[in-house]
């Protein structure tokens, strides 16, 4: 018999993926974070590895096991994820930003646990803006093919396209987090994917199935550019 074996679609490519939430300390015992589970980013890492890529996962604090064959770097804060991303992005072909990075961090982290006092019924935390990880990667002179996510509760198409343009992304995958069956902590997700001259709806599916579909779109656009 005569047959030909096709190379997997990401064979020989280096892929960096950010996943999970970040955690911004208030004092030694408290922090600001969000509901990201990391499942979508980890599913993308596992699928990319299976599709032949060399995968590096930059992960915030999550309760997930690292997919077999994937290199994982743990990062807690947005600033740590930013540093790790810049160090890795120079030497990768595709960068996928799936992490729910805290937009702001506490301006001054208290050295000791903040005490509750009788004379204080109200308190204010001053926050400062964090660096934008994916925008920094997309601003590199030798930028990889850069894919962002957009979590929206309204005007999904408009905000997603605006984010893609503003951050100089090659593709953006938008999900409607106002729907409880998709996004943040669920097993399933649905995505509307945009690139500068096209779009594609990926219907509600398990995150691992969805990851494969998204990577197929990424591989196609990466090859086309
Ligand atoms: N992102 C990032 N670094 C940040 C904030 C966001 O890398 N400091 C990335 C996310 O990983 C995602 C994309 O930017 O790929 C969009 O994140 P999102 O929170 O939807 O957008 P923002 O630009 O932060 O705008 P907003 O939260 O106001 O909608
Ligand atoms: Ca944000």
Image: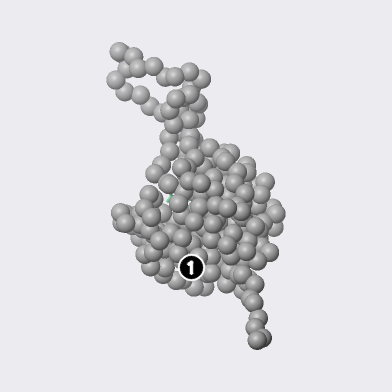
- In this rendering, the answer to whether 11 lies above or below 105 is below
Residue at position x 48%, y 68% in the image: 213
Which residue occupies the extreme top position in the image?
Answer: 118
Q: How is the image coloured?
A: one colour
Residue at position x 58%, y 65% in the image: 51
Residue at position x 38%, y 68% in the image: 203
Relative image position of residue 223 (x, y in whole percent) = 63, 72
Q: State the residue in front, 107 or 222.
A: 222
Relative image position of residue 27 (x, y in whole percent) = 46, 24
Residue at position x 68%, y 64% in the image: 12
Q: Residues within 10 Å of mark 1 (few under 14, many from 20)?
A: some
Number of marks in the image? 1
Image quadrant of residue 143? bottom right
Please tell me whether mark 1 sits on a helix, a strand or a loop: helix
Image quadrant of residue 15? bottom right
In the figure, is residue 94 to the left or right of 26? right
Relative image position of residue 218 (x, y in whole percent) = 55, 66
Instruction: Answer whether residue 141 is visible to the viewer in this image.
Output: no
Q: State the residue in front, 173 or 163.
A: 173
In the figure, is residue 180 to the left or right of 190? left
Read off the residue under disc 1.
213
Image quadrant of residue 181? bottom left
Quarter of the image with the N terminus is: bottom right
Which residue occupies the extreme bottom position in the image?
Answer: 1
In the figure, is residue 151 to the left or right of 120? right
Instruction: Answer whether residue 64 is visible to the viewer in this image.
Output: yes
Q: State the residue in front, 33 or 121.
A: 33
Quarter of the image with the C terminus is: bottom right
Mark 1 Cβ and ligand 1 under 8 Å apart: no
């Amino acid at each position: 018999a005569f047959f030909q074996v096709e190379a997997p679609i990401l064979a020989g490519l280096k892929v960096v993926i950010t996943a999970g939430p970040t955690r911004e300390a208030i004092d030694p015992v408290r922090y600001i974070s969000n509901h990201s589970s990391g499942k979508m980013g980890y599913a993308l890492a596992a699928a990319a590895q299976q599709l032949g890529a060399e995968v590096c996962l930059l992960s915030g604090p999550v309760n997930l096991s690292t997919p077999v064959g994937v290199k994982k770097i743990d990062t807690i804060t947005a600033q740590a994820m930013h540093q790790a991303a810049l160090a890795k992005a120079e030497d990768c072909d595709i960068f996928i930003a799936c992490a729910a990075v805290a937009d702001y961090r506490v301006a001054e982290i208290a050295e000791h646990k903040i005490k509750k006092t009788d004379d204080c019924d109200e308190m204010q935390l001053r926050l400062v803006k964090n660096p934008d990880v994916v925008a920094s990667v997309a601003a590199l002179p030798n930028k990889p093919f850069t894919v962002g996510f957009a979590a929206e509760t309204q005007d999904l198409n408009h905000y997603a396209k605006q984010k893609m343009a503003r951050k100089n992304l090659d593709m953006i995958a938008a999900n409607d987090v106002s729907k409880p069956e998709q996004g943040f902590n669920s097993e399933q997700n649905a995505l509307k994917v945009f690139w500068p001259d096209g779009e594609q709806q990926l219907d509600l599916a398990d995150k691992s199935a969805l990851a494969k579909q998204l990577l197929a779109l990424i591989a196609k656009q990466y090859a086309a550019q």
